[in-house]
Amino acid sequence: MKLTGLRVIDLSQFLPGPYLTLTLADHGAEVIKIEPPGGDPGRSIGLSDGPASVFFRNLNRGKKSVVLNLKDDADRQALLELCETADVFVESFRPGVVERLGVDYEQIAARNAGIVYCSINAFGSEGPYRDHPAHDLATEALAGVLSMTLGDDGRPAIPGIPMADITAGLQGLAGVLMALLRRQQTGRGEHIEVAMFDALFAATANIIGPVFAENRQPNPKHERTTGGSAFYRIYDTSDGGQIVLAGQEMKFVERVLDALDRRDLIELCARGPGPHQQPVIDCLAEFFASRSRHEALEWLAKLDVCFAPVNTLYEATQDANVAARDLLLTDEAGRRHLAPPIRFADEPARPKFQAPALGEHNDAVLAQIAKGGSQ
């Protein structure tokens, strides 16, 4: 696998950091998860279908668990010695915490100049929110993303996935891999900082146009991908289901409106998104409301346009594409796992499905310190 031989020390908890290190583990890295005596809080989040919660094993499969109390001198010394053999270090504390614990980048780089040290936090080490505790939703609110995610009542709605957590984890992964690539040339590591707020703010590239061009707040109901286009919307069907149209190119517009014998509406779509498209929205809404979801999907399938049913999450697990692409994997105990999304033709990921018990690898890992080796 691509990362076989890479040793990663993972001090992160909850979601962004573990999401980053999960990818490293799935592709062959040895990830040693350092947990406090009480363990990662993720161990008790949500439902369980085995020894660990689904949340925890989704993010920590294939890792090793070592319990260390970093306020204890001996345990902190053990971690520092372990870092001498590591390639990557990931932490997700608030700024200043690793300095107080004595495991900040400077302390570890003094022992291992090649270490790639990644800090993931909410707001970064500078700025007015530096010391504020926060999870995903607060960063989404401050970054303006919630103001663009509105329900039918016009109020901000909580997104279904933790976008700041995931984007920060992915940006952290990219940073780690870039730093490792550079280390091949320089022999030196790097300190990477990824703030959830920064990662999410950078992800507004496709919706921030009105702010940059006209110094105004975008109106989600009138913008291209948030409600202002008849061909990028959710429509109700007669049986209580929903479908989406999700392609605004004129070739798709023309195919649908031709089939409806409403070429008179094409010009409204050609003018771009905005309230002038309301007659098109009304026409499509009336048409789909007169058909069941199945009937609407059959009709759209004949037109070669962008569309999809609005699946529930359970329905998505039953989708033919999920089966065809092996996106759900099953372990020996019959538990389901999400497959790694990065696919290499020659060296595919080989995830280890076992999530570690708390402190399961203390003896094996700490015994290596004196030898200075890895497993």
Image (cartoon, grey):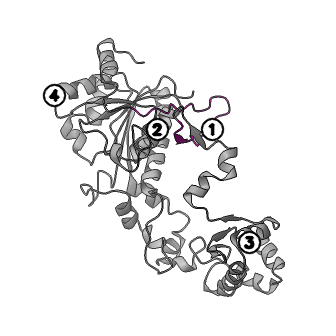
Circle 1: residue type: Arg
Above or below 107: residue 95: below
* Residue highlighted by disc 2: 22
* Residue highlighted by disc 1: 343
Q: Which residues are magenta?
A: 334-356
- How packed mark 4 is, by other alpha carbons closer than 10 Å (few <14, some 14-19, many 20 or more), is few
Is residue 348 highlighted in magenta?
yes
Rounded to the nearest angstrom, the CA distance separating label 2 from label 3 is 39 Å
* Residue highlighted by disc 4: 73
Circle 3: residue type: Ala
* Residue highlighted by disc 3: 296
Q: What residue is drawn where x is 79% and y is 87%?
A: 264
Q: Position of residue 218 (x, y in %)?
A: 50, 76
Rounded to the nearest angstrom, the CA distance separating label 4 from label 3 is 66 Å
Q: Main secondary structure of the magenta part?
A: loop
> Could you tell me if the residues under marks 1 and 3 are in contact, i.e. CB atoms within 8 Å?
no
Earlier sequence position, callout 1 versus callout 2: 2
Q: What residue is drawn where x is 38% and y is 67%?
A: 141
Rounded to the nearest angstrom, the CA distance separating label 1 from label 2 is 15 Å
